[in-house]
Image: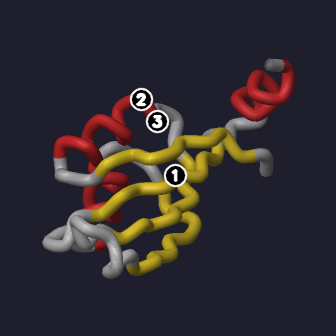
Amino acid sequence: MQEATARRLDGRAPLYTLVLSVPQHGETGQIADVVRRHRGQIEWLSGQSMSGTRNGTSRVHLRLSARRIDDIVPALEAAGFDAVRVVLTAR
């Protein structure tokens, strides 16, 4: 808890790592648009194809800094992405 408080006091937004399940029709450009609309900043984004799965989804790993992750995750889910994992990451 002290580490999270220290991060807020130094003026930087917390850093998160997300794993998203992307449907076949989904585009990673949509992810960047959603994050920007909610005042987040993408540090890196990496994709992994899962074409062998039944539903043909892909996994996308992304690291972003944002003050309000609770706004970004529901917006990504509303855009058709499934948040598999959300982790607060140390800087």
* Left or right: 6 as drawn, with respect to 11: right
| Residue furthest left in the image | 25
State the separation of the CA atoms marked 1 and 2: 12 Å
| Closer mark to the observer between disc 1 and disc 2 | 1
Check residue 18 in the rendering and tell me which mark sits there, or answer none: 1
Classed neighbour count for the residue bearing mark 3: other residues with Cα under 10 Å, few (<14), some (14–19), many (≥20): many
**Residue at 70% in and 29% down:** 8
Display colour scheme: secondary structure
Residue 84 or residue 31, whichever sits in front: 84
From the image, which quarter does the N terminus lie in?
A: top right
Q: Which element is circle 1 on?
A: strand
- For marks 1 and 3, give the one nearer the viewer: 1
Mark-to-mark CA distance, 1 and 3 = 10 Å
33 relative position to 47: left or right: left
Image vertical order of residue 77 relative to residue 2, above or below:
below
Label 2 vs label 3: CA separation? 4 Å
**Which residue type does callout 3 highlight?**
Ile
Residue 39: which numbered mark, if any? none
Q: Mark 2: which secondary structure? A: helix
The picture places residue 13, in percent across and down from the top left corner, at 61, 41
Q: How many marks?
A: 3
Q: Earlier in the sequence, mark 1 or mark 3?
A: 1
Please report contact status of discs 2 and 3: CB closer than 8 Å, yes or no. yes
Q: Residue at x 56, y 49 (%)?
A: 65
The amino acid beneath tag 2 is Asp
Tag 2 residue: 70
Disc 1 marks a residue whose amino acid type is Leu
In this view of the protein, which residue sits in the foreground, 49 or 32? 49
Q: Crowdedness of circle 1 by 10 Å Cα count: few (<14), some, many (20+)?
A: some
Rendered image: mark on residue 69: 3
Q: Earlier in the sequence, mark 1 or mark 2?
A: 1
Residue at (60, 47) in percent of width and height: 16
